[in-house]
Amino acid sequence: MPCSHPLPIRDRRGAVAIIVVLALVALLGAAALVVDLGYATASKQELQAGADAGAHAGAVFLDGTADGLDVARAAAVDGAAFNEADNSPVVLDPSADVTLGRWRISTGTFDPSESDPRLINAVQVVTGRDDLPAWFSHAVFGRTALSAGVESIAYHSTSGAGEVQCVIPIAIPSCVLYKPGTTTFKPDLGEEDFVLNPPGINNIGWAMLGGGTPSADYLVDMMGNCTLGGAVTVSDIVGLNNGEITSALMYLAEQVEASTTRWEDHTYPGTEELVFGDLPVQDTFSPYSGIDADKWGNTFEAPIAVIENDEYCDSPSHPFLGDWPIVGFVWGAVYDVVYTGPVDKTIRMRFDLANPHNLGTDDGGINFGIEYVKIALVK
């Protein structure tokens, strides 16, 4: 019977050495996969965070104007740079890495060919790194560096504000903003005076959050601190009063005089044309304006509530009384107050629907120019 002879010790040592080398190669390969690819994955996540931040920051400034496009591109670069990948800022090339276009919600696609600023609503950021370290991969596979690429798209959408944090305690029926029998805003709406009194002309009224009859103390407190009532939302109830309330009128006149906003601040987008038209000549005869002559042209501005008051719409001489639900908000600018004399004490104000006021803290209201802006990451 033949005898088997064990390998010589020298041969066994050689076989073990080969096994060790093969095992070491396998371990290094595994380390390359675990360490290097793990680091590359982490860096890609950091790049993605930078791209998301850049796209989001840029989309905020897409306001339908050509100037907004330039600001959006710069904001995307700045937004990304606040983030780091591989221990260095995420740097975007504004012309190569940032693309402005239109996000089509219906199809879920991005159209980079859109050139009309009014239709551009999205920012695409595409970036990457091709110099990520390859410690083990270099030793095992000869790779000198690893790469990672990311893409992000954010789009800008607006809707009527369903909630705001600040209001002047005045309300207006929605019907007086529209052409008769339509839901189309009146042409040159900003040039029309809206007044509290005299009877038969008044189309605005005092308003108290929560319902009830507005008192002088309440009105003064709200005009002094328009956030006093907290968040104001669509479907909230306001109580109306179109009384002359002299102390509230006097306080409102003081607010106009102290204001830093002016009549000429309101222009149509991209033009120097005044939304409110020419500043009216101040009335210096009884019942005369309560605004100091050197303050004429000052405006006291903030959102006011738009209500659904069918009784007023059916009969414009109907007084502002009762409790009514809010359906949206409009930007009001009080420019004149008359608080002397036995009659015809009044407020005169204009409304700016030509310029969006992005003050909504929630959506859900009819859009009267005060908007809720939503920036959504979609990719």
Image (cartoon, grey):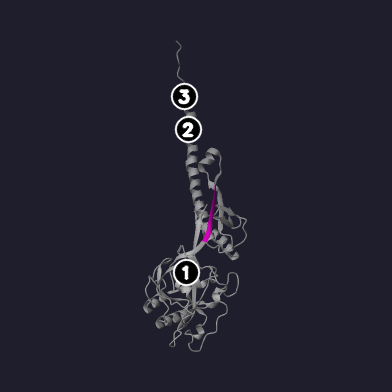
Q: Amino acid at mark 3?
A: Arg
Please tell me which residue lies in front, 133 or 15: 133
Relative image position of residue 375 (x, y in whole percent): 50, 59
Q: Name the front one of labels 3 and 1.
A: 1
Q: Is residue 359 magenta?
A: no
Res 75 seen here: yes
Report, in whole angstroms, how far the alpha carbon at label 1 lies from the one at label 2.
72 Å
Is tag 3's residue or tag 1's residue first in the polypeptide sequence? 3
- Quickly name the residue at label 3: 12
Q: Amino acid at mark 1?
A: Phe
When asked about the image quadrant of residue 180, the answer is: bottom right
Is tag 2's residue or tag 3's residue first in the polypeptide sequence? 3
Q: Residue at x 44, y 71 (%)?
A: 167
Q: Secondary structure at mark 3?
A: helix
For disc 1, the neighbor class at 10 Å (few under 14, some 14 to 19, many from 20) is many
Res 302 seen here: no
Q: Is residue 149 magenta?
A: yes
Q: Which mark is residue 329?
A: 1
- Quickly name the residue at label 2: 23
Q: Which residues are magenta?
A: 148-157
For disc 2, the neighbor class at 10 Å (few under 14, some 14 to 19, many from 20) is few
Please tell me which residue lies in front, 261 or 23: 261
Relative image position of residue 240 (x, y in whole percent): 41, 75
Judge left or right: residue 13 versus residue 122: left
Report, in whole angstroms, how far the alpha carbon at label 3 lies from the one at label 1.
88 Å
Contact between marks 2 and 3 (CB within 8 A): the answer is: no
